[in-house]
Amino acid sequence: MSEAVLDSGAEIEAPGTKGVVDDFARDKQVFGVPWGKAMMWIFLLSDTFIFSCFLVGYMMVRISTTDPWPFPSEVFSLTVFGTSVPLLLIAIMTFVLITSSGTMALAVNMGYRKDRNKTFWLMVATALLGATFVGMQAFEWTKLISEGVRPWGNPFGAAQFGSSFFMITGFHGMHVSAGVIYLLVIAFRVKNGFYEKHGGNYEIVEITGLYWHFVDLVWVFIFAFFYLW
Amino acid sequence: MAEEGQQHPLKIYYWIWVLLFVVSFFSYMVDYLNFQGAVRWTLILVFMFVKAGFIIAIFMHMKWERLALKLAILGPPAAILVLIWLMSYEGLYVEDTRLEYYGESTMVPQEVPHH
């Protein structure tokens, strides 16, 4: 078997399941992507299970409690100019996160074009939007805590509301915070030419992007199941 | 795979970006317009899967990856459906048990303060 077949994933993919069998059966990299990207995907797969367990646990306690479940629409409403708008803060947070996903997608694209300046600024913008999201989440937590919502109980209904809320949004917020740091580290490396010394390869921007989009993806599910349901 | 990884025209990203905003607006409207019951749950799920699909397929480039990677990453989460199915039955059973032994809830929730 030649060297090229051993280490590259670049050969033509056979159609359908034959391609899958080929990819796994040959003595070569299975997925035809850089190892860092494959590893990020596998990490995200494991993270999918963690968040799924949280959401399924939330579903289970919400089904099994006999106490009334608090109305998220009211609990998360904000009063603007004297009128109460349901879920306003959550809606704004959602829009901030989607905006950051867009800037991230553009950063990945600019990375592959080797436009280091644009990549840097788009990643910084993404990180700033992420930090804004965490800030708004801190505001939301403060508001709920001041109203008496605790992991072990709250005045608006079933005690399980607080435990699910703090676990799920807390774990997601931690992911966003870690993502902000990750983004800034990679952004500054792009800017100061770190990757030029390593063959000018900007796949790392796409790998960082995968993590960031995943955080946005998890929010889509939290928004649907926790805030809207 | 192209020699330089995932390179696609910018246009597709702008499109998906706009669509994500539009679909998020729709899912917010589900709450704002106060849909209830089966309609609410169906709409929430439809908008959720549309958004998740766009993010995974386009922003995360899954659409352009090899089928081997797609199956390896998107296949295993299907196991979660079994967990959902089991836990929903378990949840109903626990609820029945609580009603049987503790009776109906006597909790009177407070109004949410508006400030």
Image (cartoon, grey):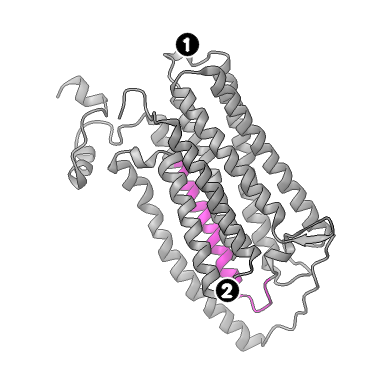
**Residue A50 in magenta stretch:** yes
Instruction: Looking at the picture, tell me which residue is in the foreground, A4 or A128.
Output: A128
Majority SS type along the magenta span:
helix
Instruction: Looking at the picture, tell me which residue is in the foreground, A182 or B24.
Output: B24
Q: Residue at x 22, y 25 (%)?
A: A6
Q: Residue at x 47, y 61 (%)?
A: B46
Instruction: Looking at the picture, tell me which residue is in the foreground, B94 or B60.
Output: B60
Q: Which residue is mark 2?
A: A63
Quick check: A21 above or below B84?
A: above
- First in sequence: mark 2 or mark 1? 2
Q: Residue at x 21, y 36 (%)?
A: A13
Q: Residue at x 47, y 43 (%)?
A: A44
Q: Which mark is residue A197?
A: 1
Instruction: Looking at the picture, tell me which residue is in the foreground, B37 or A49.
Output: B37
Quick check: A220 above or below A105?
A: below
What amino acid type should be assigned to the residue bearing mark 2?
A: Ile
Tag 2 and tag 1 share a subunit: yes
Q: State the extent of the magenta-drawn residues as a range.
A: A43-69
Where is residue B67? Give x, y as percent.
28, 43
In this rendering, would A204 be left or right of A170? left
Quadrant position of residue A143: bottom right
Q: Please, which chain is the residue tagged with disc 1 on?
A: A
Q: Residues within 10 Å of mark 2 (few under 14, many from 20)?
A: some
Where is residue A1? Give x, y as percent.
14, 24
Where is residue B74? Give x, y as percent.
37, 49
**Residue A156 in magenta stretch:** no
Q: SS for tag 2?
A: helix
Q: Please, which chain is the residue tagged with disc 2 on?
A: A
Where is residue A54? Give x, y as percent.
56, 58
Q: Does residue A45 appear in the picture of this structure? A: no
Quick check: A184 above or below A30?
A: above
Numbered circles on residues, count:
2
